[in-house]
Image (cartoon, rainbow, N blue to C red):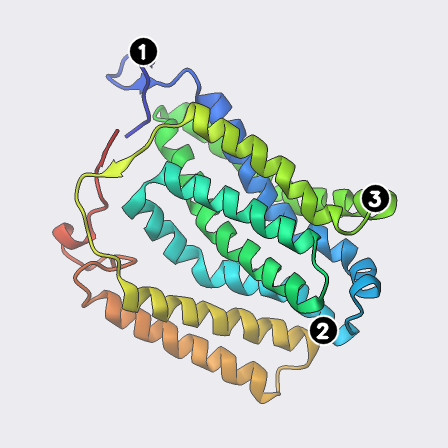
């Protein structure tokens, strides 16, 4: 179902309507997703300057990047499901505002622990923001041809985000400070929040389902173990217990999650073999 407004126009040959603000919504969603993607790389350039300023070791430096990846990867599925339950616009705004607040705290960090905690919070709010952005985009573009173009633009933004982060991080670190690699997110978030408030409408699920908390805990723990295991392999090796132990635990937790989803009353990720009544996504009213 697409978001509509009083000025929506019908699509030729179909009964669907097109939101005249849809391309502006694409810009808003793309800007938010760009912020999430580039933040994974922009801080990498600033790490040597941050290390000198805050006085942490080279071994500890990896955690500034890993904390973001751990939180983002662990909570991504949970964030998507939460958006289905409480509404995509609310989730989008909460994610963008939380991401901005975490960025401000990270930019003002006075210690290594404060910086790592802020980066973990960025990853958590990014996991809330990214699925909501994608969901808003899919419901805004109802015409198949336009949807293909919109997702093409969206994919280009995601693909370019890493490169933009490296370039922008170098410029900000060289001419301002490493802290601006985090403060710059306030600009992106401000524009995204303004666009979401003015352009998008609130969506509520008609059917209320309970949040699958055991499933969320299992998949979050599984993704945490997998991301940590692969990150640890990059700095140590594949033969250390902290690498293969976490990877094995992640695989086991994923298997437990898949088993639970086949039995849960309101599964977080409905399996294909579940009944239609269980697996059907919530319908929306505006």
Residue 156 picture location, percent across and down: 59, 37
Between 144 and 61, the residue placed more toward the observer is 61
**Would you name the residue on which mark 1 appears?**
12
| Residue under the image location 80 percent in, 44 percent down | 172
Disc 1: CA contacts within 10 A as few (<14), some (14-19) or many (>=20) = few
Q: Quadrant of residue 18?
A: top left
- For the residues labelled 2 and 3, say whether their Cβ atoms are less than 8 Å apart: no
When the figure is inspected, residue 65 is found, relative to residue 192, above or below; the finding is below
Q: Quadrant of residue 158?
A: top right
Residue 208 picture location, percent across and down: 18, 47
Disc 3: CA contacts within 10 A as few (<14), some (14-19) or many (>=20) = few
- For the residues labelled 1 and 2, say whether their Cβ atoms are less than 8 Å apart: no
Residue 185: tell me if it is visible.
yes
Residue 152: tell me if it is visible.
no
Quadrant where the image shows the N terminus:
top left
| Residue under the image location 41 percent in, 66 percent down | 220
Q: Secondary structure at mark 3?
A: loop
Residue 115 picture location, percent across and down: 66, 62
Mark 1 vs mark 3: in front? 3
| Residue under the image location 69 percent in, 45 percent down | 183
**Would you name the residue on which mark 2 appears?**
60
Disc 2: CA contacts within 10 A as few (<14), some (14-19) or many (>=20) = few
Left or right: where 26 falls relative to 47 = left
Earlier sequence position, callout 1 versus callout 3: 1
When the figure is inspected, residue 125 is found, relative to residue 48, above or below; the finding is above
| Residue under the image location 61 percent in, 71 percent down | 231
Earlier sequence position, callout 1 versus callout 2: 1
Q: Residue furthest right?
A: 175
Mark 2 vs mark 3: in front? 3
Residue 286 picture location, percent across and down: 26, 29
**Would you name the residue on which mark 3 appears?**
176
């Amino acid at each position: 179902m697409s978001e509509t407004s009083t000025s929506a126009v019908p699509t030729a040959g179909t009964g669907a309507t097109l939101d005249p603000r849809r391309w502006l919504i694409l810009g808003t969603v793309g800007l938010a997703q760009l912020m999430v993607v580039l933040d994974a790389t922009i801080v990498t350039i600033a790490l040597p300057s941050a290390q000198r300023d805050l006085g942490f070791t080279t071994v500890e430096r990896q955690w500034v990047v890993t904390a973001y990846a751990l939180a983002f990867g662990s909570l991504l599925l949970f964030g998507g499901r939460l958006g289905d339950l409480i509404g995509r616009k609310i989730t989008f705004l909460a994610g963008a505002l939380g991401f901005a607040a975490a960025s401000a705290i990270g930019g003002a960090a006075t210690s290594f622990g404060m910086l790592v905690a802020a980066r973990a919070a960025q990853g958590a709010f990014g996991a809330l923001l990214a699925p909501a952005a994608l969901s808003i985009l899919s419901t805004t573009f109802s015409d198949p041809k336009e949807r293909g173009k919109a997702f093409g633009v969206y994919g280009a933004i995601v693909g370019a985000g890493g490169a933009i982060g490296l370039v922008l991080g170098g410029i900000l670190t060289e001419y301002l400070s490493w802290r601006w690699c985090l403060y710059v997110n306030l600009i992106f978030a401000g524009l995204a929040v303004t666009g979401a408030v003015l352009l998008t409408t609130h969506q509520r699920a008609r059917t209320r389902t309970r949040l699958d908390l055991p499933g969320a805990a299992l998949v979050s723990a599984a993704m945490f173990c997998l991301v940590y295991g692969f990150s640890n392999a990059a700095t140590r090796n594949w033969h250390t217990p902290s690498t293969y132990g976490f990877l094995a635990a992640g695989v086991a937790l994923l298997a437990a999650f898949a088993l639970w989803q086949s039995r849960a009353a309101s599964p977080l990720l409905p399996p294909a073999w579940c009944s239609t009544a269980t697996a059907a996504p919530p319908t929306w009213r505006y």
